[in-house]
């Protein structure tokens, strides 16, 4: 879950449509130089998006922040995403592994934002897009 200190000073409640989210979700815009939104979905999933920044540097920062909280994630499958992006999965260990999905632009000409992140806990078994666990031999 995303933790924001002094939310009144650092965040502004944003409309779902303005941030590109729909459905059962609460959305905040974070204090930043560019549009950065964080969303808390009704099912416990958290999402974040940034329109600006170096996508690879932002991805490294996300993974470092997760690791700093004691979660070890293994890279899973990378697949094409909508709007000219790449969706890379990073997954924890069972039971109910934590999954981080990071979508970045496929290239510099892409019209998508710098990064879109989903963080959720899998329901049940490790999803097939996660690939083998750390230390496990691929089949």
Image (cartoon, helix red, strand yellow):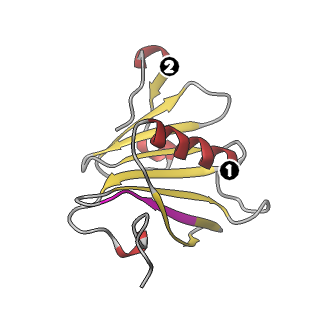
Q: Position of residue 117 (x, y in %)?
A: 49, 51
Q: Earlier in the sequence, mark 1 or mark 2?
A: 2
- In the shown orientation, is residue 44 left or right of residue 113? left
Disc assigned to residue 15: none
Whether residue 122 is situated above or below residue 20 in the rendered picture = below
Is label 1 in a helix, a strand or a loop? helix
101 or 92, which lies in front? 92
Residue 28 included in the magenta stretch of the image: no
Can residue 22 be seen at all in this image of the molecule? no
Mark 2, residue position: 10
What segment carries the magenta color?
87-93
Instruction: Name the residue at 43% across, 77% down.
Output: 137
The residue at 37%/56% (across/down) is 92
Residue 4: give x, y in percent of width and height. Answer: 42, 25
Residue farthest along the bottom direction in this orientation: 139
Q: Residue at x 30, y 68 (%)?
A: 126
Dot 2 alpha-carbon crowd within 10 angstroms: few under 14, some 14 to 19, many 20 or more: few
Q: Is residue 67 left or right of residue 35?
A: left
Q: Is residue 5 above or below residue 91?
A: above
Residue at 47%, 42% in the rendered image: 67
Q: Which quarter of the rendering shows the C terminus?
A: bottom left
Residue 101 horizontal/vertical position (percent): 47, 58
Question: Quick check: is 92 in the magenta stretch?
Answer: yes
- The answer to whether marks 1 and 2 mark residues whose Cβ atoms lie closer than 8 Å is no
Q: Quadrant of residue 97?
A: bottom left
Quarter of the N terminus within the rendering: top left
Identify whether 62 is placed above or below 88: above
Q: Main secondary structure of the magenta part?
A: strand
Label 1: which residue? 55
The answer to whether residue 34 is visible is yes
């Amino acid at each position: 879950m995303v933790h924001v200190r002094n939310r009144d000073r650092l965040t502004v409640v944003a409309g779902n449509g303005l941030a590109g989210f729909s459905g059962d979700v609460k959305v905040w815009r974070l204090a930043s130089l560019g549009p950065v939104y964080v969303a808390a979905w009704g099912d416990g999933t958290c999402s974040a998006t940034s329109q600006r920044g170096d996508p690879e540097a932002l991805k490294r920062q996300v993974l470092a922040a997760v690791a700093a909280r004691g979660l070890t994630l293994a890279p899973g499958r990378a697949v094409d995403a909508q709007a000219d992006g790449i969706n890379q999965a990073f997954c924890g260990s069972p039971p109910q592994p934590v999954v981080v999905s990071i979508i970045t632009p496929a290239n510099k000409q892409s019209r998508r934002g710098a990064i879109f992140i989903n963080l959720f806990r899998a329901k049940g078994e490790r999803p097939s897009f996660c690939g083998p666990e750390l230390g496990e031999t691929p089949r």
